[in-house]
């Protein structure tokens, strides 16, 4: 069962968790440099993924923050593989 967040609730959750994007970027800065990725491009991709992660979150499958971090890390890896 998916969550039943309204758009306003989803947006509030996304705004409250924007710090997760910075955390993932900070942890993977060497990877970004090696793949020659621009900070702004990666931030935008991860922001879109954050919105999709919150919208598609199933509360019965675990914690929201764990889901967000897993989705953001996956998206970052997709950014690096598409840059080559």
Image: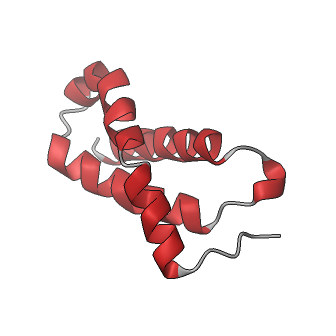
> In the figure, 46 relative to 4: above or below?
above
Question: Camera-side residue: 12 or 22?
Answer: 12
> In the figure, 66 relative to 47: above or below?
above
Write the residue at 27% across / 47% down: 42
Q: In screen coordinates, is 17 left or right of 5? A: left
Image-quadrant location for residue 83: top left
**Could you say where residue 6 lies in the image, as x and y percent from the top left?**
57, 80
> In the figure, 40 relative to 36: above or below?
below
Q: In screen coordinates, is 11 left or right of 33? A: right
Write the residue at 77% across / 45% down: 62
Total marks shown come to 0
The type of colouring in the image is: secondary structure
Q: In screen coordinates, is 10 left or right of 32? A: right
Location of the C terminus by quadrant is top left
Image-quadrant location for residue 47: bottom left
Write the residue at 18% across / 41% down: 39
Asked whether the viewer can see residue 49, the reply is no
> In the figure, 57 relative to 8: above or below?
above
Write the residue at 81% across / 50% down: 61
Location of the N terminus by quadrant is bottom right
Asked whether the viewer can see residue 32, the reply is yes
């Amino acid at each position: 069962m998916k969550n039943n967040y309204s758009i306003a609730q989803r947006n509030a959750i996304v705004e409250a968790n924007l710090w997760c994007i910075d955390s993932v970027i900070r942890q993977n800065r060497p990877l970004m440099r090696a793949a020659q990725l621009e900070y702004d491009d990666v931030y935008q991709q991860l922001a879109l993924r954050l919105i999709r992660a919150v919208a598609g979150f199933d509360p019965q499958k675990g914690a929201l923050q764990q889901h967000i971090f897993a989705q953001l890390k996956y998206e970052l890896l997709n950014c690096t593989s598409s840059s080559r």
